[in-house]
Image (cartoon, rainbow, N blue to C red):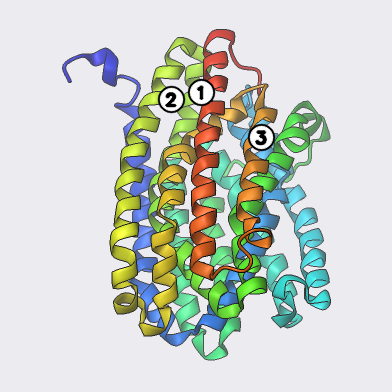
């Protein structure tokens, strides 16, 4: 511990940034933890299943809202380019959110993947939620570039508390209360970001967008498939096993998302910013930095996976109620998946600094095959067995992804950047 060269990549600015974002995320997640046992008593499994479908659509469609130009904001070499990317990204969000609403209405009218349960009002909510999510994503990355961690923290806390409180207040409306709370919570919290970033101005710069064409052309398809992997299980389980199984999986994903988001988001944001600076200034230190962060995340992932596997099936009914036993069993089955996800996902943003990011597609399509596996060889098993199958396959794909990341970081360290 006395060797400063060993700890220098991880101390000082890196840890202060992680603690700033992580502390705010912890406050945001606290309300979700406290509210979950209440929400599961005022909303039934079918309501949670509908909410899970809605959030799954938002999670997938929101990847397309800014065409991944938000990632370019951090990697841009000039501050003026970053500002124009941010302003132009907000314009793109409005256009793509409208297209997303049309896609939601198409699914609703066709009754595909269970979306026929929604009323026409849900389509309007989908547009508002997509626009709010896209704005938040673009502004968050702009604040990250400027190292305005306090702004990011206040926004994160405000959004989490707003969504949960509104969902509780609107519970008399049934499943629509969950959707309204989700949408309005995303919308009202944007005020924190706009107030903290007063330098923004109306602008649309096609020249700058063209200069960073690799983000929508190469990284957008990869990110879309990756997000599809995360959101596909709930509608898939609704289709194969019914709304109750989908609701149980939605709750399980919500629970595991709390610690993964708390740790992963904070580390991912700061790691991406520091890795970008390190690549420009001291590229020889990048590999050691990557390995140390990955090792620390791996230890935390192992601890979290053990807790889920050993305790979740035993305490789920006590925490959430007797009708949520299936969710507890699913939580235990997700342990291998969560362990590797926490270890690998936060450091994976290094691909955005690399000119070889197309290699990530190998991981993306392996993961897609893993989550779609119930359609083929797990279809006639129960929902818990299906979650176990997906979990083990996903753990394997994260392991393969880590090997790809090691290759990319090694190449970056000795050949320099080029992704931006």
Res 379 → quadrant:
bottom right
Indicate the secondary structure of the residue bearing disc 1.
helix
Name the mark nearer the viewer: 3 or 2: 3
Q: Say whether disc 3 or disc 2 marks the residue closer to the N-terminus.
A: 2
User: Mark 2 = which residue?
Assistant: 290
Left of 300 or right of it: where is 343? right
The x, y position of residue 130, in whole percent, is 68, 61
In-front residue for pair 407/121? 407
Name the mark nearer the viewer: 2 or 1: 1
- Inter-mark Cα distance, 2 to 1: 8 Å
Q: Verify CB contact (< 8 Å) between mark 2 and mark 1.
A: yes
Q: Say whether disc 2 or disc 1 marks the residue closer to the N-terminus.
A: 2
Q: Verify CB contact (< 8 Å) between mark 3 and mark 1.
A: no
- Inter-mark Cα distance, 3 to 1: 14 Å
Residue at the (50%, 86%) spot, across then down: 171
Q: Quadrant of the C terminus?
A: top right
The x, y position of residue 81, in whole percent, is 68, 29
304 to 115, vertically: above or below? above
Q: Quadrant of the N terminus?
A: top left
Q: Say whether disc 3 or disc 1 marks the residue closer to the N-terminus.
A: 3
Indicate the secondary structure of the residue bearing disc 3.
helix
Check residue 58 in the rendering and tell me which mark sits there, or answer none: none
Left of 84 or right of it: where is 304? left
Check residue 362 in the rendering and tell me which mark sits there, or answer none: 3
Residue at the (76%, 49%) spot, across then down: 91
Using a 10 Å C-alpha cutoff, classify the residue at mark 2 as few (fewer than 14 neighbours), some (14 to 19) or many (20 or more): many
User: Mark 1 = which residue?
Assistant: 406
User: Can residue 306 be spotted in the picture?
Assistant: yes
Using a 10 Å C-alpha cutoff, classify the residue at mark 3 as few (fewer than 14 neighbours), some (14 to 19) or many (20 or more): some
Using a 10 Å C-alpha cutoff, classify the residue at mark 1 as few (fewer than 14 neighbours), some (14 to 19) or many (20 or more): some
């Amino acid at each position: 511990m006395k060797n400063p060269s060993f700890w220098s990549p991880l101390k000082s600015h890196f840890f202060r940034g992680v603690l700033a974002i992580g502390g705010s995320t912890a406050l945001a997640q606290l309300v979700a933890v406290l509210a979950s046992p209440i929400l599961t008593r005022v909303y039934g499994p079918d309501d949670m299943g509908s909410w899970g479908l809605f959030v799954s659509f938002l999670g997938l469609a929101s990847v397309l809202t800014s065409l991944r130009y938000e990632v370019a904001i951090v990697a841009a070499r000039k501050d003026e380019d970053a500002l124009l990317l941010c302003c132009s990204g907000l314009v793109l969000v409005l256009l793509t959110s409208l297209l997303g609403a049309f896609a939601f209405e198409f699914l609703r009218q066709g009754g595909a993947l269970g979306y026929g349960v929604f009323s026409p009002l849900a389509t309007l909510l989908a547009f508002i939620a997509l626009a709010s999510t896209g704005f938040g994503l673009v502004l968050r990355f702009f604040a990250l570039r400027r190292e305005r961690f306090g702004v990011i923290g206040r926004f994160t806390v405000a959004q989490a508390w707003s969504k949960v409180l509104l969902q509780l207040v609107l519970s008399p409306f049934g499943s629509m209360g969950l959707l309204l709370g989700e949408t309005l919570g995303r919308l009202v919290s944007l005020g924190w970001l706009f107030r903290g970033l007063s330098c923004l101005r109306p602008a649309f710069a096609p020249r700058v967008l063209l200069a960073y064409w690799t983000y929508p052309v190469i990284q957008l398809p990869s990110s879309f498939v990756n997000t599809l992997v995360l959101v596909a299980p709930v509608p898939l389980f609704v289709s194969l096993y019914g709304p109750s199984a989908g609701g149980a999986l939605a709750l399980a994903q919500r629970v595991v998302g709390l610690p993964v988001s708390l740790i992963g988001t904070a580390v991912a944001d700061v790691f991406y910013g520091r890795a970008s600076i390190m690549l420009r200034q001291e590229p020889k230190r990048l590999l050691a930095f990557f390995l140390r962060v990955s090792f620390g995340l791996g230890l935390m992932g192992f601890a979290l996976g053990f807790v889920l596997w050993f305790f979740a099936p035993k305490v789920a009914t006590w925490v959430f109620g007797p009708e949520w036993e299936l969710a507890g069993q699913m939580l235990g089955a997700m342990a291998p998946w969560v362990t590797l996800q926490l270890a690998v996902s936060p450091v994976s943003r290094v691909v955005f600094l690399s000119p070889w990011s197309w290699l990530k597609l190998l991981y993306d399509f392996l993961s897609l095959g893993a989550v779609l596996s119930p359609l083929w060889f797990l279809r006639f098993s129960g929902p818990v067995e299906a979650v176990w199958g997906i979990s083990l396959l996903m753990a394997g794909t994260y392991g393969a992804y880590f090997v790809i990341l090691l290759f990319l970081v090694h190449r970056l360290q000795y050949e320099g950047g080029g992704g931006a």
